[in-house]
Image (spheres, rainbow, N blue to C red):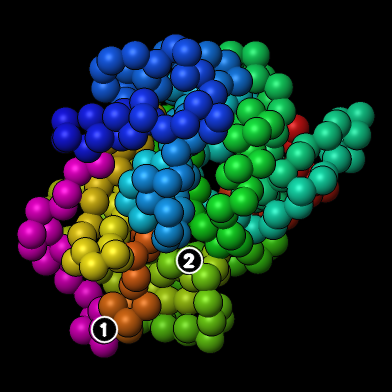
Amino acid sequence: MQVARFTFALAFLLAPAAPLHAQDQLGPGSAAEAVEKLKPGEFLWAPEIAPEGPVLLIVSLATQRAILYRNGIPIGVSTVSTGRTGYDTPTGVFTVLQKQVEHYSNLYDNAPMPYMQRLTWGGVALHGGNLPGYPASHGCIRLPQDFAKRLYGVTRLGMTVVITEEASVPRLAPSADPAGAGFAPGPAEAGVIWRPGTAAEGPVSIVISAADKRVVVLRGGKVIGSAPVVIGEPVTGTTAYVLRGGAGQPPQWLSVALSGGTQVEPVAEGFWQRFQVDDAFRRSVAGIVAPGTTIVLTADTLDRRNEIDKQRTVIEVEPRP
């Protein structure tokens, strides 16, 4: 949607110089052009565009960019450096499991990892670090130091992070349980599950798998519900949706670009009627959905049992720089 992209770019161009790195490189044009012009270590930051609401981070391996959305509005864009060959950063739908301002790697020469935000118990995290302009980490997502600090200040445990690349479909990552249990119910639990007491508070994320014909609800990074779902139309690839609302505005679902752009598009009226799920489950989910809630719709399976079993055998549990 051209208006959304233009508004985003205009807000950056009019923002004060202090919070805007790379402002010298910005000129007329869309936000997409501004994002492409960012040099390694540069970022854009304009939180005043959406001062309140939960946040969602999209990391694109293909473009080496991270886009931060708050209440469905992009408020920050940063260059990143992800895992080099042999230490690939995994794609998937993650939640922030742990935060630590001062952290050092116990595997790589005590390397500093400031403003660390853990995404997996197998060694993947967001943190400040060196950005040479290409994938160079041991699997982590390196951010400019100042951006890492600012990001740390607006996130909370359980927030959603989607790591994607155009040729790869993300899967649901292990939860705050180091064993990773709970995402794919076994045969005995193939029906409706609703256990809101598992996590009484925190950001809400919903993942719908067309392959599994199942919807999984997370709150604060923990699974609180799951149910079979019938989808009325074929699903290809992966799409993220976020609920925008507040400030007197009616709630509105927006689709969010996963390829590294800043585009957001309004979801057509009646879109969610394509999905048929147990009525009681739907009402329960509706009771916890609020502005900032994220839905990820994927054609892929959520069953990561084989990967989880491998992860249990990994001795390394500290994030890798």
Label 2: element kind = loop
Label 1: element kind = helix
Q: Is residue 143 left or right of residue 214?
A: right
Residue tagged by mark 1? 283
Region of the chain picked out in magenta, as a range: 264-283
Residue tagged by mark 2? 203
State whether residue 44 appears in this view: yes
Q: Position of residue 213 (x, y in %)?
A: 28, 62
Q: Residue at x 42, y 46 (%)?
A: 48
Q: Nearer the viewer, residue 313 or 232?
A: 232
| Disc 2 versus disc 1: nearer the observer | 2
Instruction: State how far apart marks 2 and 1 are (Cα).
Output: 18 Å
Q: Amino acid at mark 2?
A: Pro
Residue 238 sits above or below residue 12 on the image: below
Q: Position of residue 320 (x, y in %)?
A: 75, 36
Q: Counting other residues with Cα less than 10 Å from the Cα at mark 1, is it few (<14), some (14-19), or many (20 or more)? A: few
